[in-house]
Image: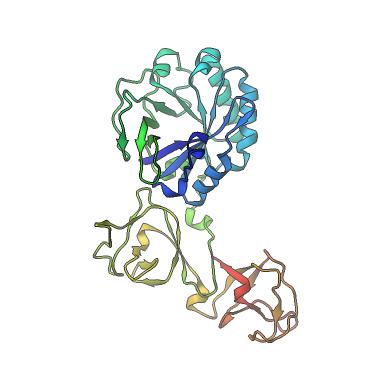
Amino acid sequence: MLNLVDISNWQGSAGFNPSTVSTDGYIVKATEGTSYTDPYLKDFADKTLASGRVLGLYHFATGYNWKAEADYFLSRVGNYIGKAVLILDFESSAVTTGGVQFATNWLNYVKEKTGSTPMFYTYLGVENSLNWSSLSKQYPLWLAQYNNYNTVNGFQPRSLYGSLKYWAKMTCFQYTSSGRLIGYNGNLDLNVFYGTKEDWCKKAGNFDGVNEEMAWHPEVKWNQLGMFRINRANGINLYTSSDLAIVTQEDGHDAVRKYGDFVIWQAKGGAVKLGTDVQWASQADGLTKINPLAVNDRARAICKITTDDAYTQNEPDWKTGGIKHLPKGSTWQVFGRVDKYLIVGGEKDGKYINGDKAVIVL
């Protein structure tokens, strides 16, 4: 399962920073009605994706014009389609104003336009009171049900009080609006998603059988050994050495890292060093990409130019004059290196490029 927090301008205006709270992902408010876009949408969504966490985006319905509301939502989340689970938040006046037909039309339309199946959010009372038989087998349910407003410290998923009437199960459960997590001094909505990160990605429409490792292309400096990506929903342990026998301790607890990409400084026997001498991780706990030029100066690779003043030259020496300008952002085949100078051409076009003006694309 995944532990998730849903956030909006309420948290944003209170100084919430998604980077400081430990979660498996965020569900972010995108729009409401046909004229309101949450001012924190882009910031929250971009930071969530950049950290490697799962992302959901929801539309708060008013219940008046389903097509206008769906089109407005899609116009604001277009850059994230395929990267986020899309959600209809159906509560409050929308229930009495729009009813089942509004929700049906909105969900069907968004699915048709995006190719991914949106999720339906509502309260247990709404699920029990209206006839959802036409939707319950088509769209996953994100259910909210609190029972009380007692403070819940940390993620503590619980069983539902009561029972579902139309859905066979909940896909996601919002079990409190009074959650407290380290990194934010205020109440948060805490949720549990009953599935893996891969399951979430399938619902977002961005998992089509493509191997994550093949789709991941980190960039490193010419002399960096590689990159390691954590892709375990519950995080990974760090160890004191490459034999992975003793878990590193931090503040009296086992050291855990949950998200992100890390430079590899050393690799040995199926372990990678991500920082200091006590920050070793098992390669089995994530994705590893090794820079071939860091271990073999005659290896082939791809480089990308990162500066405006990159020129080829015929000698691996900073005093050598430039021959051919390589535009910033362009990519080139690398046929080896001499020290930090990457071999990208021949004598006529200039054989070398200064590695400090490029990155290796793994």
Observer able to see residue 235: yes
Q: Relative to the observer, which residue lies in front, 95 or 312? A: 95
The residue shown at (60%, 30%) is 112
User: Residue, x 64% and y 67% (percent of image)?
Assistant: 306
Residue 353: x and y in percent read 65, 77
Residue 302 quadrant: bottom right
Q: Count up the numbered dots.
A: 0
In the rendered image of this protein, does residue 142 appear above or below residue 79? above
Quadrant in which residue 163 is drawn: top left
- Quarter of the picture containing the C terminus is bottom right
- The image shows residue 98 at horizontal and vertical percentages of 55, 15
Q: Residue at 40% of width from left, 26% of height from top?
A: 143
- Residue 198 falls left or right of residue 357: left
Q: How is the image coloured?
A: rainbow
**Quarter of the rendering containing residue 271:** bottom left
Q: 152 or 118, which lies in front? A: 152
Q: Residue at x 39, y 16 (%)?
A: 128
Left or right of 234 on screen, residue 49:
right
Q: Is residue 53 visible?
A: no
Which quadrant is home to the N terminus? top left
Q: Residue 345 location, x and y as percent? A: 68, 78
Locate residue 141, reporting x and y percent. Answer: 43, 27
Q: Is residue 152 left or right of residue 103?
A: left
